[in-house]
């Protein structure tokens, strides 16, 4: 590992996440605390590798608690193999990626107008239940169980309609 140092925003951008998410992962123990250099924090290459590994583990349907266990039990070299994709991952508890492709339009929500449950971005199995993930904004998703009661589905539709109306009013 080199002596490259990243500021929080640089590290978050390099992985495609938010600074808030990076801070949360430090708080949860998924990432080591950054070094302090004067008034700034400094993140190193290990942070970048661990963040990329976290992303891959999430893509393989690992919950954060399982990711913490995986990262704790592995050497940095093993974590690098997860991050670069050279290690095949098996989802915990027998969960597997859906056998069918995403069921929604790939266009961002702002381009496709009000979302409906039928336009959810992906379907993922969690604890034996199927959930639709609806992107509300970059980095913000709403999960709705396929077996959610009708009144819950109506609530989701109202939320989505409200978001759409707010965006329309702002010229988005």
Image: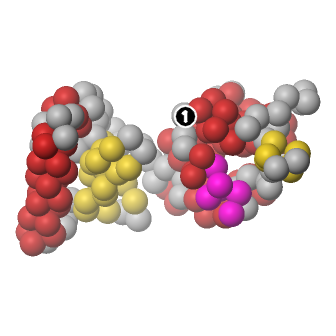
In this orientation, which residue lies closer to the viewer: 163 or 16? 163
Please state, as top left, top right, bottom left or bottom right, where the N terminus lies in the image: top right
Residue at 35 percent of width and 51 percent of height: 141
Q: Residues within 10 Å of mark 1 (few under 14, many from 20)?
A: few
Residue 66 can be seen in this image:
no
With respect to residue 68, does 150 lie above or below?
below
Judged left or right of residue 33, residue 94 is left
Residue 50 can be seen in this image:
yes
Q: Is residue 168 magenta?
A: no
Q: Which residue is mark 1?
A: 16
The quadrant holding residue 79 is: top right
Residue at 46 percent of width and 53 percent of height: 95
Residue 23 lies, in percent from the top left, at 65, 55
With respect to residue 143, does 120 lie above or below?
above
Residue 124 lies, in percent from the top left, at 35, 50
Q: Main secondary structure of the magenta part?
A: helix
Please state, as top left, top right, bottom left or bottom right, where the C terminus lies in the image: top left
Residue at 82 percent of width and 50 percent of height: 39
The quadrant holding residue 145 is: bottom left
Question: Across the whole image, how many numbered discs are drawn on residues?
Answer: 1
Judged left or right of residue 147, residue 129 is right
Report the span colored magenta: 22-27
Determine the secondary structure under disc 1: loop
Judged left or right of residue 102, residue 42 is right
């Amino acid at each position: 590992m080199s002596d490259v140092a990243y500021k929080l925003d640089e590290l978050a951008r390099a992985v495609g996440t938010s600074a808030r998410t990076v801070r949360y992962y430090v708080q949860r123990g998924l990432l080591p605390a950054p070094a302090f250099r004067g008034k700034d924090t400094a993140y190193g290459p290990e942070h970048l590798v661990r963040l990329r590994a976290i992303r891959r583990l999430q893509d393989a349907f690992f919950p954060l608690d399982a990711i913490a266990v995986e990262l704790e039990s592995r050497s940095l070299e093993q974590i690098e193999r997860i991050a670069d994709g050279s290690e095949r991952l098996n989802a915990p508890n027998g969960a597997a990626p859906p056998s069918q492709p995403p069921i929604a339009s790939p266009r961002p929500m702002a381009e496709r107008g009000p979302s409906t449950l039928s336009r959810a971005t992906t379907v993922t199995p969690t604890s034996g239940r199927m959930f639709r993930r609806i992107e509300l904004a970059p980095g913000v998703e709403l999960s709705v169980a396929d077996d959610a009661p009708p009144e819950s589905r109506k609530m989701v539709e109202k939320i989505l309609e409200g978001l759409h109306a707010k965006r329309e009013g702002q010229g988005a």
